[in-house]
Image (cartoon, grey):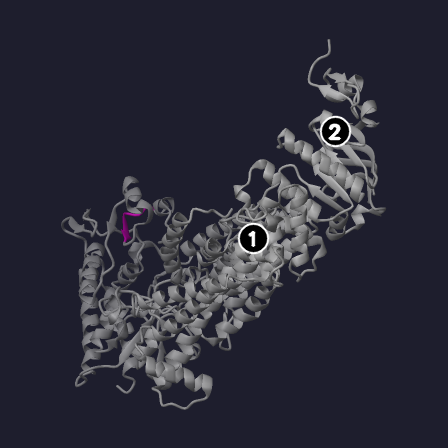
Amino acid sequence: MRSRFLIPPLLSLLLLVAACSDDDDPPPTPTSAAALEATATTEAAPLSEAKSFTGSDGETVILEAPPQRIVSLASHATEIFCAIGAGEQLVAVDQFANCPAGSDEKPAVDAFQPSVEAIVTYDPDLVYAWYDPGDLVQSLRNAGITVFFLAVPSDIEGLFDNIRLIGGIAGREDASETLIEDMEAERDAIVATLDGIDAGPRIFHESDASLYTARSDTFVGELYTLLKAQNIADEAGSPYPQLSSEAVVAADPEVIVLADFADPAEVAARPGWSAISAVANDRICPVNPDLTDRPGPNIMQGLRALADCLYPER
Amino acid sequence: MAEAIRATAAGGTHRSIAMRLRPATAAIALAALVCCMVAGTLIGPAGIGPGDTARVVLNHVAGASFDVPRQADAIIWEIRLPRVLLAGVVGATLAFSGAAYQGVFRNPLADPYLLGVAAGAGLAGAIAIVLDAPLRQGGFSLLPLVSFGGAMTAVLLAYNIAHAGGQTPNTTLILAGVTLSSISVAAISYILIVDHQSSNAVLSWLLGSFNGSGWRDLSYVLPYAVPAGIVVFLHGRVLNVLQLEESEASYVGLDVQRTKAIILLAASLAAAAAVSVVGIIGFVGLVSPHFVRLLLGPDYRRLLPVVVLVGASFLILADIGARSLVSPGELPVSILTSFVGAPFFLFLLRRQRRVYF
Amino acid sequence: MLEIRGLRVAYGEREALRGVDLDVAAGEVVGLVGPNGGGKSTLLKAVTRGVALKAGEVLLGGEDVTRLSAREIARQVAVVPQSPALPVGFLAREIVVMGRTPYLRFLEQEGLADYEKADASLASLGAEALGLRRVEELSGGERQNVVLARALAQETPLLLLDEPTANLDIGHQVVIAKLLRRLAAEHGVGVLAALHDLTLASLYCDRLVLLAAGSVVAEGAAVDVLTRDNLRLAYGADVAVLRPEGLAGPVVLPLEPD
C-alpha cells in the first residue's frame, strides 16, 4: 500500500530530470568576417513610410518603423536576424537558435509549447512565428500583439526571399542583401569546384537513428542536388520517409551522412551494413544538423561540410 | 472430440482425452507458419531472387559454398532472416503471454500489457532516449535492458499495489495496471512536448518496429521467452481450473494466489523481453488467443501450442507488410497489426456467434 | 471430522461470527439454518480457510485448518457453492473432472480413472446425460447438478453445501436431500448444508444448528431447535410450527399462528 505514495514524487523526479536535459550543440562558426563587419557598422535606417508584410496565413502586418522588441519563435528567423545585425532588436528567442557569438544571450522562449502570457510579458512589438500550436497566433493577436506568421522556406530561393523579407522588417535591407550575396558567392564557389563532374556519389542522409531521411525535394535534399549527389531516398513515397534497413543496404550508398549525432563506428556495425560501399570504404561523415537541416544563414556552411564529405579530394 | 469421449467412456482408447490436440488444426497452423517464414525470407524491398536467397541460406546453414553476391548475402543472412525469426518469436511470445493473461484474469480484453509492461518499457525507453543516455556501450545497446527494467518495475509495482492480506484481487490488479498506463501515457506525452528533437526516435520506439534488428536481438528475447513459455505451457491444466472463479478453484485444491503469481510473472517476463527489443506491438497478444479459441475451444492445453504458431504467423505477415507496402519506406508494424487484425477479428466473431467468456 | 471451537470472524468492524462452536461427525447430516446475513456463508467459508479467523479454531480430521495447504484441505472437504460460475465452452464432464484436481500432481493430466469417477458422480445424481453437453446450454438446476457432481468426484469425507436446493424444483430437492442422506449412511460422509428451507432441513438432517447474528441460537434435534420461541428469536417473526404424526421432524409454515 505504501508504494502507491511513491508514484507522485518518483514521477515528478522523472519529469524533472527529463525537463532539465539540455540540447548542447556546438555553436556553428560565425558568418564570414566581412559580413559581420558590414552589419556592425550599419545602423538601422529609419523608415520614411510604413511598410506592409503579408505572411503565409494571409494576414498583413503593417510596420511604421522597424520593431525593436522582437520575439522570434523560429530558429531560422532568429539566426537571420542575428546575421544581419538585428540581434539588438530581439528581446526573446526560441530555445534552439544559435545566434552568432558576439550577440548577447537572449532569454529563451519555448517555441513548441509557448505560453501566451510569457510572450506578453516581454511587451513585444512584433512576434515572428512559423508554427501555430493551439491557436497561439490568434491568442496573441487577441492580446493586441502584432504577429507575423511565415512558413519555413522550402528551397534556397525561398530562403533568400525570407532573408530579404526579414531585412525589410528589421530595417536592415542593405545587410540582408549583403548576406544574400555572400551566401550566393559561397554557394557558387563550392559548386564551381565540382566542374567536370557529371554525377556525384550515391548518398544516404540520416536524420534519425531509426533511419529517417529526406528526399531531393526537401531543403536539405536541394543541397545534395547542388552537389550532384544521388539521393537513395528518392524512390520513397513521402518527403521525409523512414527507410527499411534492407532498402538502405540494397541501395548501396557510397557516402553516409549522419545528421543525428550517431556514432559512425556503431552505424558501421549495424546488421548487414558491412556490405554497403560507404561502410566498406569508411565514408561515413557526421555533420551538424543545425547547419544542414535548418534553412538559415548558416546553410552554406552546411553545404561546405557536405561538399567536404562527398568530395574529400577537392 | 465427442466421438473420442464416447469411445473412451465405452472403454475404448487408453490416451487421456485432454492430451489429444485437434491434429488437423495444429498441423495447418504449423504449415501456415512455415509458409509465412518462407514468404518472409523471400519478400522484401531488395528484390533478391529466390535462387540467391536459397543459396545464401544453404551456405550458412548447411555449410555449402555457393557463389552469391556480397550484398545478397548481407541482406538475407544479416537482415531479413533474423528479422523474420524475431517477428516469429515475438509474435509467439505475445500470443502465449496474452493467452496466459486472459486465463488468469478471465477477461476477454486482457492482453500482455495489462499490468504495465508497455507502460513501464515505453516510459523507461523514452526517458533513456531523451536523456541521451549513453545507451551504446561498445557496440551494445542498453536500451533493451533499460526498458526491460522499466517493464518489470511497472508489473511488480502493480502487483504490490494490489496485494493485500494474502490476496491479489484481479480487479485491483487491473486498476493498478490501468493507472500505471495512464501515468506513463501522460509522462511520455510530456516528454515528447519538452524534447522535440527526440520525438521521432521516441515515437519509433513506442510504435514498435523490426527495422534494424539482427541476430543479437534474438539473443535478447529467447532467454526469457523460452523458459517463460515452458512455464506457461506446463500450467495448461491449471489455467483450465482457474477458469472457475477463484474461490471455486481453491475449493478443488489450487493455491490460487501462488499460481496466479507464477503464471503472471512468466508471462510478464516474456512480454517485457519482447517489448524491450522491438517496442510496443499491439493486437497480437489480444487477438491471437481469441482466434484460436474460436477454432479449438477454451481448453488451454489445446490452445497454447496453436496460439504460438498463430501469433508467430500473424506478426511475420504484418512485418512483411511493414517493409514492403511503402518500399523503400518502412511502416510501423503496429499500424499493420491493428488495421488488419481488427476487422478480421470482427469478421470471425460474426461468423461464429459463440462467445467464450 | 469437523470441529469448530469459539470461531470469531470479522469483516472490518462488523463481527460476522461471534464465537461459534459446531461439530460434524462422520456419517451425519447437519443442517445449518438461520436468517440471511446471520453468518451461514461465513461459517462455511471459514472451514476452507476462505476467510481470516479472528479467534477460535477449525479442525479438519483433527488438524488445524490454518496449517493445511489448499490441496490438503481439498482432500478433506468439498464445497458446493451457492451460485457457481461455470466457464463457457467446457463440457459438463470436463467441469466435473476438475474435482479430481487435488489428486493430480502438477504435471499430471486427468486419466481414464478420473473420467470414470466423474461419470459415476453424474450418474449418482441421475444426470449422466449432462456429461457431453456444453455448460452454457444447461438450466440452473442442471448446473447445480454439475457442481454437486464435481464435489462428489472430489471423494472427500466432508461435504459442505451452501443452499444446494435454492434453484431446484421440488422433485430435484428431494433427489438431492436423499442423496445427502445416502452419502452419509452408506459412505460415512459428513455433510454440513446451509439450508433456508426449514422444513426440508427438519426432515432430512440428523441435527440442526440455528445461527442468527453470528451466534448459535439453538442446536440439536429438529424438534428441539425449531420451536416458535427459537424462530422468533432468530428470524424476528412469529411462525407456525406443526408436528404431524409420523414425520421425522416438525414442519414450519410461513404463517402466523392464530
Distance, label 1 to label 2, CA atoms, is: 39 Å
Give the image location of residue B109, x and y in percent: 49, 49
Q: Amino acid at mark 1?
A: Gly
Q: Nearer the viewer, residue B82 or B127?
A: B82
Residue at 70% over, 27% down: C197
> Is any atom of residue C93 visible in this view?
yes
| Magenta-colored stretch includes residue A124 | yes
Q: Where C25 falls versus A312 (above or below)? A: above
Quarter holding residue B264? bottom right
Left or right of B238? Residue A126 is left
Left or right of C237? Residue C88 is left
Q: Where A303 falls versus B293 (above or below)? A: below
> Is any atom of residue B212 visible in this view?
no
Q: Which residue is mark 1?
A: B103
Give the image location of residue A117, x and y in percent: 37, 44
Give the image location of residue B173, x and y in percent: 58, 48
Pointer 1 indicates a residue of which chain? B
Q: Which region is colored magenta?
A: A123-129
Element type at mark 2: helix
Residue at 71% over, 31% down: C195
Q: Which residue is mark 2?
A: C201
| Magenta-colored stretch includes residue A296 | no
Mark 2, Cα crowd under 10 Å, few <14 / some 14-19 / many 20+, is: many
Quarter holding residue A95? bottom left
Residue at 74% over, 29% down: C201
